Amino acid sequence: MNERDLKYRMVEPLFGPAGGHRGGPHFGGMGHLGGGPFGGGRGRRRRGDVRAALLLLLAEQPRNGYQLMQEIEERSGGRWRPSPGSVYPALAQLEDERLIRAIERDDTRLFEITDTGRNHLEERAEHSPPWEDDESEAFGDLRGQMKQIHMALMQVMHAGQSAQIERAAQLLAETRRKLYRILAEDEDA
């Protein structure tokens, strides 16, 4: 097996086929290592979470859809970036329910919360904002480690000898198995 084939054999089981499309399961398509199961790409949340986030942000000040998406991403530390396909329909639904209304300010369409929307939020005041997560520091640490591992892996792939590449592949396979064991332990607890 030549060195190029060995490199792809090492990466494919972990991150999908090399040269796949952007946004696919392979490592390169995950942007800044935030896509996939770690939620930083287009992180998935339940529809109610998007609605709650929009109402909470509009209770602070009027915003447009783009500002709302940016603010959710910022407050979640980049772990959750709702797509326009989830935000704009949720805004339309909230507007239909008279919880928010569209206004024009400086030739820009903004949304603001209504009194009905404020009452709706007060009834649910005990819930924490959907972008808050008690484990956000641990998530940030894990994400940082993933970036560093990615850089080290790329160095080994580009500069390593065949034996070093093989050892790296074995180490990654063992690490993957250990990560799955962590999940299995949590299920038993």
Image (cartoon, grey):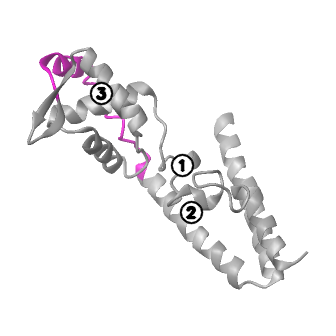
Residue occupying image coordinates x 75% and y 68%: 171
- Within 10 Å of disc 3 (Cα), the crowding (few <14, some 14-19, many 20+) is many
**In magenta stretch: residue 43:** no
What's the residue type where badge 3 is placed?
Leu
Sooner in the amino-acid sequence: mark 1 or mark 2: 1
Q: Which residue is mark 2?
A: 146
Q: Gap in Å between the C-alphas at discs 3 and 2?
A: 35 Å
Q: Horizontal placement of 68 versus 1: left or right?
A: left
Q: Earlier in the sequence, mark 1 or mark 3?
A: 1
The answer for how far apart the CA atoms under marks 1 and 2 are is 10 Å
Circle 1: residue type:
Phe
Would you identify the image quadrant in which residue 61 lies? top left
Q: Classify the position of the N terminus by image quarter.
A: bottom right
Q: Is residue 150 visible to the viewer in this orientation of the structure?
A: yes
Q: Inspect this view and state whether residue 127 appears.
A: no
- Residue at 43%, 26% (x, y): give it: 47
Q: Residues within 10 Å of mark 2 (few under 14, many from 20)?
A: some
Q: Above or below — where is 162 with respect to 18?
A: below
Q: Which residue is mark 1?
A: 38
x and y, in percent, of residue 140 in the image: 45, 57
Q: Position of residue 120 (x, y in %)?
A: 23, 17
Left or right of 72, for residue 147: right
Most foreground residue, 73 or 167: 73
Relative to 102, does residue 181 appear above or below in the rendering? below
